[in-house]
Amino acid sequence: MDFDFSPIVDNWRFFASGLGVTIALSAISALTSILVGLFITLVRLYGPPIFKPFIVFYIDTMRSIPILVVLVWIYFAFPILAGVTFPPFWAALVALTLHIAAYAAEVVRAGIESVRPGQTRAGLALGMSRAQILRKIILPQATIRMLPAFGSVLTIAIKDTAIATVIAVPELMHRAETVAGQSYRPIEVFTCVMIAYFCILFPVTRGVDRLYQRLAHLGRS
C-alpha cells in the first residue's frame, strides 16, 4: 500500500487553524473548569450547609453522564428549553466546563482536606480568620499536592475537545474528518492527527510532572 501525505501538506493551513481552535478550547475549558471546581468546593466545604446536597448531586450527576451526552444536550436540547442558542464553540466550552468541573471539584476537595486540621487550629490560635487561613496556609499547600491531578484535568480537557467535532466545532479532529473525506486518505490524515495530539499532550504531562517534582517539598507538612 502506498502512502500519500500530500493532503496534509497541501492543507497545512487548514489543519493549523483547527489546531489553534483545539488549543484555545482546551486552555479556556481547563481554566474555567478549575475555577468552577474551586468555587463549588469552597461553597461545599465552607458555605451554608443547605448548598451541599445540590453540589454533591451536581458532581455525581456530571461524573455519571458521558461528555458526549452533555455536549449534545447543551447544543441541541438546551436552546429548545431556554430559547438561547450557543454557537458550536461556546456550546463545547460550556459542556466541557460543566463536565470537567465536577472532576476538578473532587481534586480540589481532596487537596484541601489533605492539609492537617491542626494547621487550621494553629491559625485560629494566632488570631487569623478562616479566610486568611484558607488563603495563606491551606491553599498554598493544597495547590502543590493537586498538581498531578490538575495535569490529568488538563489532559482530559485537551482530549475531550475532539468530541466537539460532533457539533461542527472547527477544531483539529473536525478538520481531519473533512480532509480525509475529500482526499480518501484516512490513514495518513488520522495518523498525523494522532501524532499532533501526542505532541501536545506529552510535553504537558511531563511538564506538570517536572513542576511537581520541583515544588513537592513545599506541599509537605
Image (cartoon, rainbow, N blue to C red):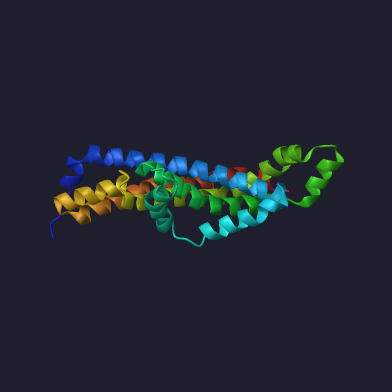
x and y percentages locating residue 212 in the rendered image = 57, 46
Q: Residue at x 36, y 47 (%)?
A: 199
Relative to the observer, which residue lies in front, 182 or 90? Answer: 90
Quarter of the N terminus within the rendering: bottom left
Where does residue 191 sit, x and y in percent of width and height?
26, 54
| Residue 50 visible in the displayed image | yes
Identify which residue is drawn at 20% across, 41% down.
11
In this view of the protein, can residue 114 be seen by the observer?
Answer: no
Number of numbered discs overlaid on the protein picture: 0
On screen, residue 57 versus residue 198, left or right, reads right
Q: Position of residue 121 (x, y in %)?
A: 83, 47
Location of residue 69 (image quadrant): bottom left
- Which residue extends farthest bottom? 64
> For residue 129, what is the image quadrant?
top right
Report the residue that reaches farthest toward the right: 125
Percent coordinates x, y for residue 182 in the rendering: 15, 50
Q: Quadrant of residue 93?
A: top left
Q: Is residue 89 left or right of residue 135?
A: left
